[in-house]
Image (cartoon, rainbow, N blue to C red):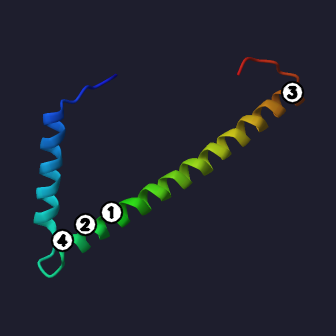
């Protein structure tokens, strides 16, 4: 499924996000520092997700290899 978002809608979402960030900022914290802190947190989450994805991809490949080997050893030749 493909969604085509208009430029005006994208700008609307950006403004809404900016307002939400400003409203959630602690009063005693500088806005630039707060945004930097949020960005760092998101970057760390993204890196964690990528590492987990890579590990799961490797494990899935290993399990597929084990499955193929077991089928060869038992003499089963079914489509994978």
Q: Position of residue 36 (x, y in %)?
A: 30, 68
Q: Residue at x 83, y 33 (%)?
A: 69
- Quadrant showing the N terminus: top left
What residue sits right under mark 2 in the picture?
A: 35
* Other-residue count near label 2 (Cα within 10 Å), few / some / many at <14 / 14–19 / ≥20: some
Location of residue 65 with respect to 51 vertically, above or below:
above
The answer to whether the residue labelled 4 contacts the one labelled 2, judged by CB atoms less than 8 Å apart, is yes
What residue sits right under mark 4 in the picture?
A: 31
SS class of the residue under badge 2? helix
Q: Position of residue 10 (x, y in %)?
A: 19, 39
Location of residue 7 with respect to 41 vertically, above or below:
above
Front residue of 7 and 61:
7
What residue sits right under mark 3 in the picture?
A: 72
Question: Separation of disc 4 and disc 2 at Cα?
Answer: 6 Å
> Disc 4 or 3, which lies upstream in sequence?
4
What residue sits right under mark 1 in the picture?
A: 39
Question: Separation of disc 1 and disc 2 at Cα?
Answer: 6 Å
SS class of the residue under badge 1? helix
> Disc 1 or 3, which lies upstream in sequence?
1
Q: Residue at x 18, y 77 (%)?
A: 30
């Amino acid at each position: 499924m493909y969604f085509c978002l208009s430029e005006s809608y994208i700008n609307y979402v950006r403004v809404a996000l900016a307002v939400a960030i400003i409203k959630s900022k602690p009063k005693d914290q500088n806005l630039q520092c707060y945004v930097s802190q949020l960005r760092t947190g998101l970057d760390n989450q993204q890196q964690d997700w990528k590492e987990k994805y890579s590990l799961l991809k490797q494990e899935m490949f290993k399990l597929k290899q084990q499955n193929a080997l077991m089928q060869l050893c038992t003499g089963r030749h079914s489509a994978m």
